[in-house]
Amino acid sequence: RSPLALPYDDRPCYDAATTPSAELLGLCRPSFLIIGAGKAGTSSLYSYLQRHPKVLPARVKQTHFWKYDYSGRASIPGYYRNFPNATAFGGKGEGHVTGEASPGYLPSSESAERTGKYLKGVKIIVMIRDPVERAFSSYKYNYVNAILGDIRARGVMSRRRKRERAAEVGIDGHMEAINAEEEEVDKRRLVTFEEFVDAEIEYIRKCMMQGGGGGVMEICFEGKDEEDPREQWRSIPRSLVDERGERIDRIFDTNGNYLVRSMLGRGMYKSQIELWRKHHREEDIHVVCTASLDVQEVGVVNVGSKIDEIAAFIGLNKFNFEPAVDAIGVLNHGSKPGYDRATKWDDYWKDAVDPKLRAKIVSFFKEFEAWTGWSEYAALCGW
Ligand SMILES: Nc1ncnc2c1ncn2[C@@H]1O[C@H](COP(=O)(O)OS(=O)(=O)O)[C@@H](OP(=O)(O)O)[C@H]1O
C-alpha cells in the first residue's frame, strides 16, 4: 500500500504564492469528492473516512454546489467556506485533506466539467451498488418514506383522534402508536416498485431511441424536474376502485419527483462515469463497490482494508479503519431520513426484491450494456 500523491501538491489552501485572486486567500479546496451514486452508501463512506486523523470534516456531508449553486467564478469562495480554512489546516500540519459527498454530482456533466476546471486533480470516488438494490432503496427513501412523511405532516389523523390515541396508550407509547396508525394509510394508494420499474423501462427505451448528447440521465431526466411526468407514468393507473366502489387516488407526487422518476436511470452507471472521464484523469477516478463495504458480506477486516485502500487513493497514510466501521455501522439504512442516522451492524437487514422483478431489470440492463456497463460492473462487484 503506497499512497498516491495528495492533490494540489499537498497545498489545498490558497496562500499568498498560490492564490489566483484575493478573495480566495486562506480558503481551502476539497481533496476528494464522493460523487455518488445516491443510495449506494455514500454517507457511510464519508463518515468512515472522517475517522482518519488527517481528514478534516466539512461543514456538511453534501453541498451539491457544482450541480445547483455554481454561478460563475464569483460563487466559488462561498463553496470553499463549507470547508475548514487555512488556519484550521495550518494548525494541523501537512498532509491533511477535506472533502465532501454529494450524490447528485455523478449524473451531472456540468459538475464533471466544473470540478475538472476548478478542482484539477481532486480525487473522485464513485460508489456503485447493485442497481436493483439501489433502485429499491431509492423507491423506499425517495417515494414511500417521503409520502409517509408528507402524510404525517398533513396529519391524516385529526387532532382529536391523536389525543384519544394518546389517552389510550399513555404518553410513552403514544408517538409510536400514532405513527403505526398513520402507516396504515391505504397501501393501495402507493404506486408499487414494479409499476414504477415497468413505466421507467418503457420511458428509457423510447428516450434512448431519440438519442442526444450526455449520459442517459441527461438525455432522459436531468433538467426535466419540472416536466410533467404523466407521460412516463402513463401505464400506471391514476386511481383504483375499492370493494365498496369508492375511488382510491394513487399518490405520485413527492418532493423529489425527479429522483422517483429515475430509479433505474441513476443505476446506469457507465454512461455517467464516462462524463467524469471526459474532464478528469483516469487515475483520479476510483470506483468502489458498495458490497465491498458491507461487513455482513465481507467481514470487518476486509471492509477496513477496503477503506484504507480508498484512503491511499486520496493520498493518505495507512490507518486502521476497523474500529470506526464497527462503531459507526450503517448510515442512512432502510430509508431512514438524514445523513447521520446510524444503524448498528447487528440490526442491519436488507429487503430482497422479488426474483422475477430482479430478472426483468437485469435483462433491461444487459440490453443497454453500453449505458449501464452491467457485465463489467457485475464482474467487478459480484452482482
Ligand atoms: N457500509 C455499507 N455497506 C453496504 N451498504 C451500506 C453501507 N452503508 C450504507 N449502506 C446502504 O446504503 C444506502 C444509503 O446510501 P447513501 O448514504 O448513499 O444514501 S443517500 O443517497 O445519501 O441518501 C442504504 O441502503 P438501504 O438500507 O437499502 O436503503 C444503506 O443501508
Image: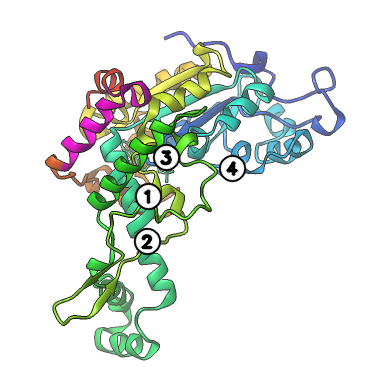
Residue position for label 4: 63
Question: Circle 3 sits in a helix, a strand or a loop, which is it?
Answer: loop
Q: Are marks 3 and 2 in contact (CB under 8 Å)?
A: no
Instruction: Tell me which corner region of the image, top left, top right, bottom left or bottom right, holds residue 75.
Output: top right
Pointer 3 or 1: first along the chain: 3
Pointer 3 or 2: first along the chain: 3
Residue position for label 2: 252
Pointer 2 or 1: first along the chain: 1
Distance from mark 2 CB to nearest ligand 1 atom below 8 Å: no
The amino acid marked with disc number 2 is Phe
Q: CA distance from mark 3 to mark 2?
A: 21 Å
Residue position for label 1: 232
Question: Circle 4 sits in a helix, a strand or a loop, which is it?
Answer: loop
For residue 370: magenta? yes
Distance from mark 3 CB to nearest ligand 1 atom below 8 Å: yes
Characterize the local packing of mark 3: few (<14), some (14-19) or many (20 or more) Cα atoms within 10 angstroms.
Answer: many
Q: Which residues are magenta?
A: 357-374
Instruction: Tell me which corner region of the image, top left, top right, bottom left or bottom right, holds residue 63.
Output: top right
> Relative to residue 159, is residue 367 drawn left or right?
left
Q: Are marks 2 and 4 in contact (CB under 8 Å)?
A: no
Residue lying at the far front of the rendered structure = 210
Residue 343 visible from this viewpoint: no
Location of residue 190 in the rendering, given as x and y in whole percent from the top left corner: 28, 63
Residue position for label 3: 38
The amino acid marked with disc number 4 is Thr
Characterize the local packing of mark 4: few (<14), some (14-19) or many (20 or more) Cα atoms within 10 angstroms.
Answer: some
Q: CA distance from mark 2 to mark 1?
A: 12 Å
In the image, residue 17 sits, relative to residue 229, either above or below, namely: above
The amino acid marked with disc number 3 is Gly
Foreground: disc 4 or disc 1: 1
